[in-house]
């Protein structure tokens, strides 16, 4: 794909803006008004995409920084355990016991 100039809007953005404009078009609206609305929507979509790209770049920078910090800290001479700690799962048996007792009591009530 070729790179677009800085001010150019992608065909996908134009198509999406026109689709949204047609969906929200009011009766009696002129073509000029629809064109202005479509241009505003295009600018909004473009601005949103730029913001998302900036956020993605910032997240990528943060990931690289944390990765670099992790690599530098792993070169320390202190021994580390690289295996992650397994979370301790405590299963509580009271709910199951109460469930069984309640069903037993209910079946005994129906039986007698």
Image: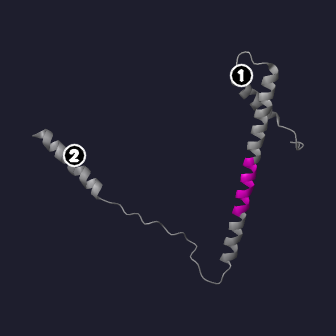
Q: Residue at x 73, y 43 (%)?
A: 48
Q: Residue at x 69, y 24 (%)?
A: 23
Classified by dominant secondary structure, the portion drawn in magenta counts as: helix
* Picture layout, residue 111 above or below residue 24: below
Side of 110 relative to 90 (left or right): left
Q: How many marks?
A: 2
In terms of sequence position, does the residue under pointer 2 or pointer 1 come before the other?
1
Task: Provide the residue designation for mark 1.
Answer: 25
Classify the position of the N terminus by image quarter: top right
| Residue 35 location (% of width, % of height) | 81, 26
* Picture layout, residue 76 above or below residue 21: below
Describe the element under mark 2 as helix, strand or loop. helix
**What segment carries the magenta color?**
51-63
Residue nearer the viewer, 26 or 81: 26
Label 1 CA crowd tier, 10 Å (few <14, some 14–19, many 20+): some
Task: Provide the residue designation for mark 2.
Answer: 103
| Residue 97 location (% of width, % of height) | 25, 55
Describe the element under mark 1 as helix, strand or loop. loop
Residue nearer the viewer, 39 or 19: 39
Q: Residue at x 66, y 71 (%)?
A: 70
Q: Nearer the viewer, mark 2 or mark 1?
A: 1
| Residue 63 location (% of width, % of height) | 69, 62
């Amino acid at each position: 794909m070729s790179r677009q100039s800085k001010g150019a809007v992608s065909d996908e953005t134009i198509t999406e803006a026109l689709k949204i404009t047609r969906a929200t078009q009011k009766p009696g609206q002129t073509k000029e008004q629809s064109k202005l609305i479509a241009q505003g929507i295009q600018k909004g979509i473009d601005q949103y995409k730029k913001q998302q790209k900036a956020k993605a770049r910032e997240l990528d920078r943060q990931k690289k920084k944390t990765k670099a910090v992790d690599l530098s800290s792993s070169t320390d001479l202190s021994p580390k355990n690289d295996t992650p700690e397994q979370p301790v799962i405590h299963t509580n048996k009271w709910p199951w016991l109460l469930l069984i007792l309640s069903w037993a009591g209910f079946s005994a009530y129906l039986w007698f």
